[in-house]
Amino acid sequence: MMILKSLTVRRQGDYYGSYRKVKASAPFEATIEVQGERGEVKLNLSADLSRRIVEIVADEAASAGRETAKMMTADAMDVKALPKATA
């Protein structure tokens, strides 16, 4: 049995400690580390698979954001008017 140890996705040219601005048009590159009974291996995923992973994450983030906005809007609608201050 293989266990996913880590998944890293970044734009090509985005390296830890780099002060360069990464181009938004640069393709994604992903690596996974898996561990099994006989050791560990680190794999580089294709640019297409890396892009597909980012699309899935982006869709889920957008969905979660919409749900959060709905809940916050519903909570705001339930707030009753504050009592008027007396002088």
Image (cartoon, rainbow, N blue to C red):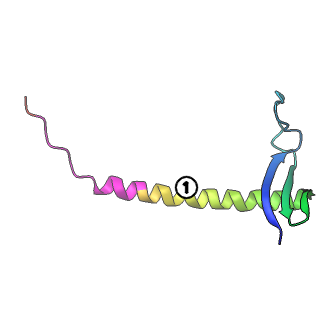
Residue 72 lies, in percent from the top left, at 41, 54
Q: Is residue 85 left or right of residue 68?
A: left
Q: Residue furthest bottom?
A: 1
Quarter of the image for residue 20 reads top right
Taking the magenta stretch, the answer to whether it contains residue 84 is yes
> Which quadrant: the C terminus?
top left
Q: Residue furthest left?
A: 87
Say which residue label 1 marks: 65
Q: Nearer the viewer, residue 70 or 49?
A: 49
- Can you say whether 3 is above or below 85 in the image? below
Q: Is residue 85 left or right of residue 27?
A: left
Residue 39 lies, in percent from the top left, at 90, 60
> Which quadrant: the N terminus?
bottom right
Amino acid found under the numbered disc labelled 1: Gly
Q: Which residue lies at the image location 21% right of the left edge and 48% below the top edge? A: 81
Q: Which residues are magenta?
A: 72-85
Asked which secondary structure carries label 1, the reply is helix
Q: Nearer the viewer, residue 9 or 39?
A: 39
Q: Nearer the viewer, residue 5 or 31?
A: 5
Residue 19 lies, in percent from the top left, at 82, 27
Using a 10 Å C-alpha cutoff, classify the residue at mark 1 as few (fewer than 14 neighbours), some (14 to 19) or many (20 or more): few
- Can you say whether 10 is above or below 17 in the image? below
Residue 35 lies, in percent from the top left, at 84, 61
Q: How many callouts does the rendering have?
A: 1
Quarter of the image for residue 74 reads bottom left
Taking the magenta stretch, the answer to whether it contains residue 49 is no
